[in-house]
Image (cartoon, grey):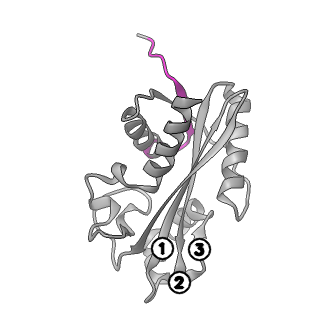
């Protein structure tokens, strides 16, 4: 049976899609998935990267869609890896990050959700402050086993309620309010 979607999440990362789908379900938005490798420009700006990805995705699929770009910004290493988070994770992983971080473990996750259709190109930002753990904890994807949100003792990977407080949740909540009222 054909399922009707309100819009599509375009990414090569099915983990991000499943999180986005679960969050948008809370707002009554039915999200489909289009798996695609999108052109990712090199930039120090998550916003510029997200806009370029959204334009690339819309040119391929010509459907209302969302893309997400995010980054982990660590204070003690000048905001690194920031917009290079995906590449850094693929090359040095969580162990490499743990080796780089010393005493100041303060960090933040930033998510930019960008919506694109034939009339709109809008971005929504979500930020969550926290710190880098001293070791990997829990089973999760990406940086989840080493990121502890403020006011928590658990990493994202150890939490059952990550989707209720994450940077992605905050950005998608802003998007949902806009989308449902546009």
For marks 1 and 2, give the CA distance: 8 Å
- Of residues 136 and 162, which is closer to you in this image? 162
Q: Nearer the viewer, residue 165 or 8?
A: 165
Circle on res. 76:
2
Q: 137 above or below 7?
A: below
Q: Which residue is mark 3?
A: 80
At x 68%, y 44%, the residue is 53
Classify 10 Å Cα crowding around label 3: few (below 14), some (14-19), many (20 and above): some
Q: Is residue 34 visible?
A: no
Q: How many marks?
A: 3
Report the magenta residues as a range: 2-15
Categorize mark 1 by other alpha carbons within 10 Å: few (<14), some (14-19), many (20+). Answer: many
Q: Position of residue 117 (x, y in %)?
A: 68, 29
Instruction: Say if mark 1 contacts mark 2, CB within 8 Å.
Output: no
Q: Give the residue at x 60% y 29%.
A: 182
Q: Earlier in the sequence, mark 1 or mark 2?
A: 2
Relative vertical location of residue 49 with respect to residue 136 in this rendering, above or below: above
Say which residue label 1 marks.
107
How far is mark 3 from mark 1, CA to CA? 10 Å
Q: Residue at x 41, y 43 (%)?
A: 19
Q: Does the magenta run of residues contain 129?
A: no
């Amino acid at each position: 049976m054909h399922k009707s979607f309100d819009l599509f999440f375009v990414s090569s990362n099915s983990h991000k899609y499943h999180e986005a789908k679960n969050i948008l379900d809370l707002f009554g938005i039915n999200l489909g998935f289009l798996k695609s490798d999108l052109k990712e420009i090199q930039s120090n700006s998550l916003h510029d990267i997200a806009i370029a990805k959204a334009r690339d995705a819309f040119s391929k699929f010509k459907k209302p869609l969302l893309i997400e770009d995010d980054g982990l910004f660590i204070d003690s290493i000048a905001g690194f890896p920031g917009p290079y988070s995906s590449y850094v994770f693929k090359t040095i992983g969580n162990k490499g990050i743990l080796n780089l971080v010393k005493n100041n473990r303060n960090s933040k996750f930033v998510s930019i959700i960008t919506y694109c259709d034939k009339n709109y190109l809008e971005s929504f930002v979500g930020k969550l402050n926290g710190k880098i753990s001293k070791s990997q904890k829990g089973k999760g994807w990406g940086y989840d086993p080493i990121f502890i949100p403020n006011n928590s003792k658990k990493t994202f990977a150890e939490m059952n309620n990550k989707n209720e407080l994450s940077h992605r949740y905050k950005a998608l909540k802003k998007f949902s309010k806009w989308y449902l009222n546009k």
